[in-house]
Image (cartoon, grey):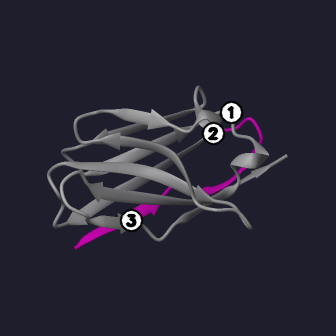
Amino acid sequence: QVQLVESGGGLVQAGGSLRLSCAASGNIPSSNVMGWYRQAPGKQRELVAGISSGGTINYANSVKGRFTISRDNAKNTVYLQMNSLKSEDTAVYYCNMRSLVGVRNYWGQGTQVTVSA
């Protein structure tokens, strides 16, 4: 099993910044993708950004140029730097880890990000 613990959510004004962190522990697959998803009220959960253990990165079009994902493999931690936040970024943000071999998939408990207009 893998445990994912998120931190860094909160309330921020539009145009502001927040940094999310997610620390993984447990039986971590050596080849994996760590990512951030978000779910706003009444909407489906969507991918925000992902980064593989080899460093391949992808972003949702809606956050390109504003959000930056990074990871520290030594600390098994992934970060999401969110700049120029908009009200539409308001959601619960979930950390995810999935293995690149096999079907292991894990979720964090979620952290609320609220952007006030």
Q: Along the polypeptide, which appears first: circle 1 or circle 2? A: 2
Q: Position of residue 107 (x, y in %)?
A: 40, 67
Circle 1 SS class: loop
Question: Which numbered tag is attached to residue 84?
Answer: 1
Magenta includes 91? Answer: no
Kindly check if marks 1 and 2 are in contact, taking CB atoms under 8 A apart as contact.
Answer: yes
Q: Is residue 86 left or right of residue 27?
A: right
Q: Along the polypeptide, which appears first: circle 3 or circle 1? A: 3
Q: Position of residue 39 (x, y in %)?
A: 62, 61
Location of mark 3 (residue):
5
Q: Position of residue 6 (x, y in %)?
A: 44, 61
Q: Position of residue 43 (x, y in %)?
A: 70, 62
Quote the CA–CA distance across marks 3 and 1: 25 Å
The span shown in magenta is: 1-16
Q: Amino acid at mark 1?
A: Ser
73 vs 105, nearest the viewer:
105
Q: Amino acid at mark 3?
A: Val
Bin the neighbour count of mark 1 within 10 Å (Cα to Cα): few under 14, some 14-19, many 20 and up. Answer: some
Circle 3 SS class: strand
Circle 2 SS class: loop
- Magenta span main SS: strand
Could you tell me if residue 113 is visible in this image? no
